[in-house]
Image (tube, rainbow, N blue to C red):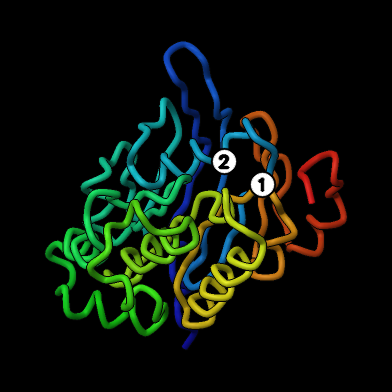
Amino acid sequence: MTTPEAPPVVELRGVHAAYGDIEVLHGIDLTVPAGSVVALLGPNGAGKTTTMKIVSGLVRPTAGHLRFSGRDVTGITAVEAAGLGVCSIPEGRGVFANLTVRENLWVSAGERASLEDMEEVAYARFPRLKERRDQLAGSMSGGEQQMLALSRALGTNPAVLLLDELSMGLAPMVVSEMYEVVAGLAAEGVSILLAEQFARIVLPLADLAVLMVNGHAVRTGSPAEIEEELSTAYLGG
């Protein structure tokens, strides 16, 4: 007997979005299969961040459908999305600068995890955070803040992890360290949707890549197929 294939963790069909009278997404189709890494690629202004905000409930689509695991949740709020296991690390890291590392983890724990569990996950992956657990997050380096942002997400055992421009403002060595963690998560079967301007950083991690330009998903394919279409003038290094 054939086992039915699980529905995608995330699915967008014909999604449009606008800020005021300006439409920024023009009928996006996107699928994140369970346990896969999908990379949204494209230059600044392509619509990557807005697409991520649709999935995380921060932007309501003006048309089209959003589904989680086969369930239509179009127009879901950010709180409802979080309740379904959607965890987002926005562009700019998104930590509470005036709280300590432990307090940031405590706030993130909510009802989904205990502080003890959050700390165990965080310090195992990033020992530096244990050394700084009583330090204000805003006083740490950009890389350490990104470690904290990742830890806040991972401690809640997310159903899908959204990563928006993880490399922004970080030194190349730190970027490599962050994406090593992401690769490890992918190997553990975490479903990941990530947006990145510098495509070649993430293509080795991805199972599927979506090329976005001016609010359109112009091409979807394997990383190898998409890489053939890249140029430094188009997407950057």
Q: Residue at x 39, y 59 (%)?
A: 140
Q: Report the amino acid beneath label 2.
A: Lys
Q: Residue at x 18, y 62 (%)?
A: 103
> Compared with residue 6, is residue 218 higher up or lower down, i.e. above or below?
above
Comes first in the chain, label 1 or label 2: 2
Where residue 19 sits in the image (x, y, percent)?
44, 20
User: Disc 1 and disc 2: Cα gap in Å?
Assistant: 9 Å
Q: Are marks 1 and 2 in contact (CB under 8 Å)?
A: yes
> Compared with residue 3, is residue 207 higher up or lower down, i.e. above or below?
above
Q: Could you say which quadrant of the image residue 120 lies in?
A: bottom left
Where residue 132 sits in the image (x, y, percent)?
31, 71
Q: Which residue is mark 2?
A: 48
The local secondary structure at tag 1 comes to loop
Q: Which residue is mark 1?
A: 197
Q: Residue at x 43, y 47 (%)?
A: 90
- Circle 2 crowding by C-alpha within 10 Å: few under 14, some 14–19, many from 20: many
The local secondary structure at tag 2 comes to helix
Q: Nearer the viewer, residue 142 or 42?
A: 142
Task: Looking at this view, name the residue that lies furthest to the bottom.
Answer: 1
Q: Could you say which quadrant of the image residue 134 lies in?
A: bottom left
Q: Nearer the viewer, residue 63 or 126?
A: 126
> Compared with residue 112, is residue 198 higher up or lower down, i.e. above or below?
above
Where residue 127 sits in the image (x, y, percent)?
39, 81
Q: Residue at x 26, y 54 (%)?
A: 82
In this rendering, position of residue 36 left or right of residue 136: right
Q: Nearer the viewer, residue 191 or 16?
A: 191
Q: Could you say which quadrant of the image residue 104 lies in?
A: bottom left
Where residue 87 sits in the image (x, y, percent)?
34, 58
In this rendering, position of residue 113 left or right of residue 205: left
Q: Report the amino acid beneath label 1.
A: Gln
